[in-house]
Image (spheres, rainbow, N blue to C red):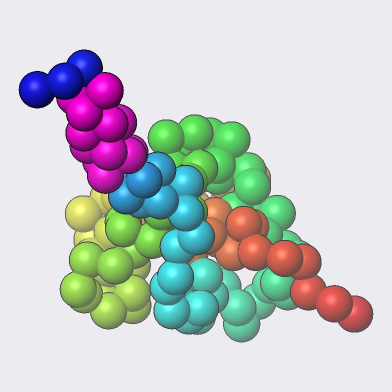
Amino acid sequence: MKRRNFLLIGAAGVAAVSIPTYNYYFGDVTYDPLLAQPPSLSLIWETHEIQAIGKKYIQQTPDERRVRTLVNLLSDGSTLQNLSIEDFKSGRTVLVDGWILSETEARQCALASTLEPPTK
């Protein structure tokens, strides 16, 4: 095989692996917008307050700062309400700005904090 052909085939192979990998880690994530709306907290807080709590949660939990990570954690097949209840039963709670939240609620707030602020 000629060196030129080898280099072209090698470059094509690297591109074939790199492009999908880049898109997976850095591309846009599509998800149901309801994932970013914690139902119980929406009854007592405005959107900007939910987003502020989400930003504080992300500061406490930097491993969960990526949208893709949050979506994966929130999309495990169970309903979000059931996940929140199970979080409280299992002691999976977090303290954010003086509020005790289930991990699911905190993650929903974090996801909401990545969205554009609401227009007034």
Q: Quadrant of the N terminus?
A: top left
Q: In this rendering, would 119 be left or right of 42?
A: right
Residue 47 visible in rendering = yes
Q: Residue at x 65, y 64 (%)?
A: 115
Q: Identify the residue at the far top of this view.
A: 3
Residue 112 against residue 22 in the figure, above or below = below
Nearer to the camera, 12 or 53:
12
Q: Quadrant of the C terminus?
A: bottom right
Q: Identify the residue at the far left of this view.
A: 1
Is residue 2 found inside the magenta-colored segment of the image? Answer: no
Q: Identify the residue at the far front of this view.
A: 2
Residue 79 against residue 93 in the figure, above or below = below
**Percent position of residue 20, x then y:** 32, 49
**Percent position of residue 53, x then y:** 64, 53
Q: Residue at x 26, y 23 (%)?
A: 4
| The quarter of the displayed image where residue 14 is located | top left
| The quarter of the displayed image where residue 41 is located | bottom right
**Percent position of residue 24, x then y:** 36, 51
Q: In this rendering, would 47 be left or right of 114?
A: right
**Percent position of residue 2, x then y:** 16, 20
Residue 69 visible in rendering = no
Q: Identify the residue at the far right of this view.
A: 120
Nearer to the camera, 27 or 107:
27
The magenta span reads: 4-18
Q: Residue at x 26, y 44 (%)?
A: 16
Q: Residue at x 71, y 72 (%)?
A: 47
Q: In this rendering, would 48 be left or right of 13?
A: right
Is residue 15 found inside the magenta-colored segment of the image? Answer: yes
Q: Main secondary structure of the magenta part?
A: helix
Q: In this rendering, would 70 be left or right of 15?
A: right
- Label count reads 0
